[in-house]
Image (cartoon, rainbow, N blue to C red):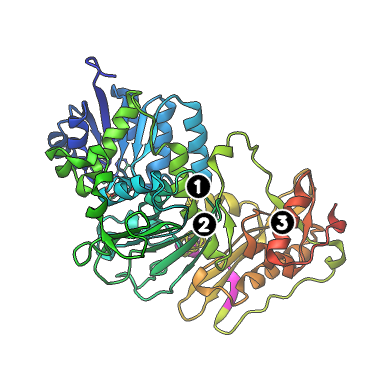
Amino acid sequence: MGAIGRVNVGIVGAAGRGGAFRAGFEANGARIHAVCDINEDALDECAEKLGAQEKYADYATMIERSELDAVVIGSPMQFHVPQSRMAVQEGIHVLCEVPAGVNVEECRELVIACNESGAVYMMAENYAYMRANVMVRELCRRGLFGTLYYAEGEYLHELKELNEITTWRRKWQTGVEGVTYGTHSLGPILQWMAGDRVVRVCCEGSGYHYKDPRGDNYHQDSNVMLCKMRSGGLVKIRLDMISERPHAMANYQLQGTDGCYESSRGGQTESAKVWLRSLSSEPMWFGLDAVEEYLPETWRNPPEVALRAGHGGSDYFEVLDFVNAVRGLAPCPIGIHEAMDMTLPGLVSQQSILQGGGWLPVPDSRQWPEEPSKPQLRMVWPERLLDSPPVPRLPDGYELRQYTAADERDYLDLMDKAGFVGWDHERVERQRRSVIPGGFFLIEHRPSHRPVATAMAQHVPDELHPQGGVLGWVAGDPAHKGKGLGLAVCAAVVARLLSGGYRHIYLRTDDLRLAAIKTYLKLGFEPFLFCEGMAERWQKVCETLGWPLSLDASR
Ligand SMILES: NC(=O)c1ccc[n+]([C@@H]2O[C@H](COP(=O)([O-])OP(=O)(O)OC[C@H]3O[C@@H](n4cnc5c(N)ncnc54)[C@H](O)[C@@H]3O)[C@@H](O)[C@H]2O)c1
């Protein structure tokens, strides 16, 4: 803590959303000591607006040099995990904007870093602090809805124009299929259903009806994720940042055995309403004023400063909880595991939608530190097919060809669309070093001249497969799925490896990549059981796919 017991706070992304937190901190005995933003031109103004003594254009330098007790991470979402990790590893408390991260793997690393650190990590899910949501949480806590078994959350916020100004949004929020920004919808619901968590999700989209100024599709307009709860209940989340319509970012419904709740949809035209058996034995709507007596004390007479703090006061109360947790006065209400409960379903939904909308399990971050990381699944090309090279078959309008250096930009785009995060020039070049001549395949969509599927034939011998050839980096544009392009590009790679004399052809994949696994099975690949637990994992995969399992050959 600072010399007089104050909490010294640094804010990264201070010229954007990070700039909204001054009132909350100052009213709660903390002060903003340093601001950081890569937009150096904005730093003077930020420091003045937030009352900060120090300014930084580089986050790592702020963490290293500034005397900070806590940081607020208000930068774009792809920086949330790296910046949070850096802080907690230095023992600096973190209040991080939503969502907690952009893929499951980096979230796992964050959880491990938080578990090893004494610092508080809180996710700034401010919708959980909105007045009506706090009220419903209290009614749930008192059991007035009975057993909760269904809920809905929607975030309908058209921001195509903002995508062009804050360009990270175009990639991370509207460029990735699935629920990319779901915590405002799921967060409050999980607090209502306290003690429950999402155990599996499936997700589908409503198609593409708008294009960005460059003529490219956004992700699908409306993404709907169904969440199966551990208790057996069901939650539906809809995210739409594309469709033209009035905003409605805080829509919720809740159903229990003794009552139900419907939020005001869009705010101005309709009020929130509730029915509780304790209010009337006949189902009928009441306004929230009928249950005003249950409003928690903090919200009864909010200080003037709270109402000025942003998002209807929720930003103030969230900062109050964070500062209390940092001071050790109260447990952190949205700590690392609650943050994961709110974030991971959306990240898994991004896999589900790419795989045709099937159900996928959502990991429980509380198990992560104990769970040793599992080796990837492997599949092999069976001996009996060594003399039967598969033949790539393409539908009209598509052409199979080799990658050239001129394809790099489109290739990176394709990998991105297929959900492979973080590919850049370096990574492509690194992978190309192991590609055999004539082994880097693209399928081009003739009308648009864009590559829409790809795979590599690579020379990757290892202990399990001496002289091994790999079918690697299979990816497809979701907008062209269902045309057999994955099968065709994989067939091309296997045929190339066979013609190159490879007799040990294998591939690595993950249990969650069900659509890809089905393609490999169809082509002729078989599961390779190289360590304990593999048979059980394959059994589960094949059961889910409805594929007859024969494991004998590859033991
Ligand atoms: N909880 C909410 O209600 C709410 C509302 C808006 C935004 N958000 C979240 O807040 C975050 C920021 O959103 P925004 O609308 O302010 O975006 P923005 O683009 O307007 O602002 C982000 C700021 O971060 C700076 N920045 C970018 N990369 C940086 C880096 N590596 N290091 C330091 N500074 C960097 C930018 O220069 C910019 O000033 C996002 O994660 C978003 O999801 C939450």
**In this orientation, which residue lies closer to the viewer: 143 or 253?**
143
User: Which span of residues is magenta-colored?
Assistant: 399-409
| 322 relative position to 351: left or right | left
Give me the C-alpha separation between circle 2 and circle 3: 23 Å
Helix, strand or loop for disc 1:
loop
- Label 1 crowd (10 A; few <14 / some 14-19 / many >=20): some
Circle number at residue 196: 1
Q: Are marks 1 and 2 in contact (CB under 8 Å)?
A: yes
Q: Whole-percent x and y of residue 288?
A: 25, 55
| 430 relative position to 323: left or right | right
Q: Mark 2: which amino acid?
A: Gly
The residue carrying mark 3 is 540
1 or 2: tag closer to the N-terminus: 1
Frontmost of labels 3 and 1 is 1
Residue, x 35% and y 54% (percent of image)?
278
Q: Whole-percent x and y of residue 221?
A: 38, 70
Circle number at residue 304: none
Give me the C-alpha separation between circle 1 and circle 2: 9 Å
Circle number at residue 233: 2
